[in-house]
Amino acid sequence: MKILRSGWRGTCFPYCVCLLLSIPYSNKAGLHVFILGCISAVLPKTEAYWPDVIQDLENIKNLIQFIHFDATLYTESNVHLDCKVTAMKCFILESNVILHECKDEIIQRTVENIIILANSSLSSRWNAIENGCKQCEELEEKNITEFVQSFSQIVQQFIFTDSH
């Protein structure tokens, strides 16, 4: 289980380029480039953590075989590509139900990690508006096994589309 940590970019790229090219930072424009470069160095990286989400979902799939979990969860089984952000938001919201209903600490920690990783991977698209998509309450309620399977499928769609 990979825990999300906000990373730092390694160096001030513009500053290093200017050092390599021996360009002095004496003019006003150079100073702006230097300052903006240093600011960009401390911005958190934006990376997709979808493969880690898949691994955590696999862990949950293995763990739920040994516990009794009778809550049902709103589950999108057939996600259209134009509705994948809406569907993912629903999966994240429904994951909170698992946190509250499941008493197994390992599953709770794994679900917490999934929520953090999925939110981070989705952060740049969180405000995306997708029209004509089903809202969570309109979805069919399914058991946790089917929920995890469908969740894995939607994550696979994100992996596929993010890599192309």
Image (cartoon, rainbow, N blue to C red):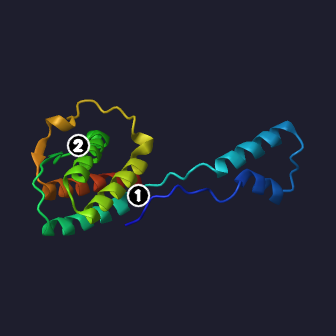
Numbered label tally = 2
Query: What residue did someone put label 2 on?
Result: 80
Q: Position of residue 40 (x, y in %)?
A: 65, 47
Q: Nearer the viewer, mark 2 or mark 1?
A: 1
Q: Where on the picture, by quarter, is residue 110?
A: bottom left
Q: Is residue 139 left or right of residue 111?
A: left
| Disc 2: CA contacts within 10 A as few (<14), some (14-19) or many (>=20) | few
- Numbered label attached to residue 6: none
* Callout 2 touching callout 1 (CB < 8 Å): no
Disc 1 secondary structure class? loop
Question: Quick one: SS at disc 2?
Answer: loop
Q: Nearer the viewer, residue 112 or 118?
A: 112
Distance from the alpha carbon under mark 2 to that under mark 1? 21 Å
The image shows residue 67 at horizontal and vertical percentages of 14, 65
Q: Residue at x 80, y 53 (%)?
A: 18
Residue 51 position by quadrant = bottom left
Q: Position of residue 21 (x, y in %)?
A: 83, 57
Q: Is residue 79 visible?
A: yes
Locate the N terminus and report the quarter of the image it occupies.
bottom left
Q: Residue at x 47, y 55 (%)?
A: 47
Q: Nearer the viewer, residue 22 or 138?
A: 138
- Circle 2: residue type: His
Q: Is residue 11 above or below residue 1?
A: above
- Name the residue type under label 1: Tyr
**First along the sequence among labels 2 and 1:** 1
* Residue 160 visible in rendering: no
Q: Provide residue 52's location: percent of width, then percent of height.
A: 37, 62
| The quarter of the displayed image where residue 12 is located | bottom right
Image position of 29 (left or right of 152): right
Q: Residues within 10 Å of mark 1 (few under 14, many from 20)?
A: many
Q: Which residue is mark 1?
A: 49
Q: Nearer the viewer, residue 164 or 156?
A: 156
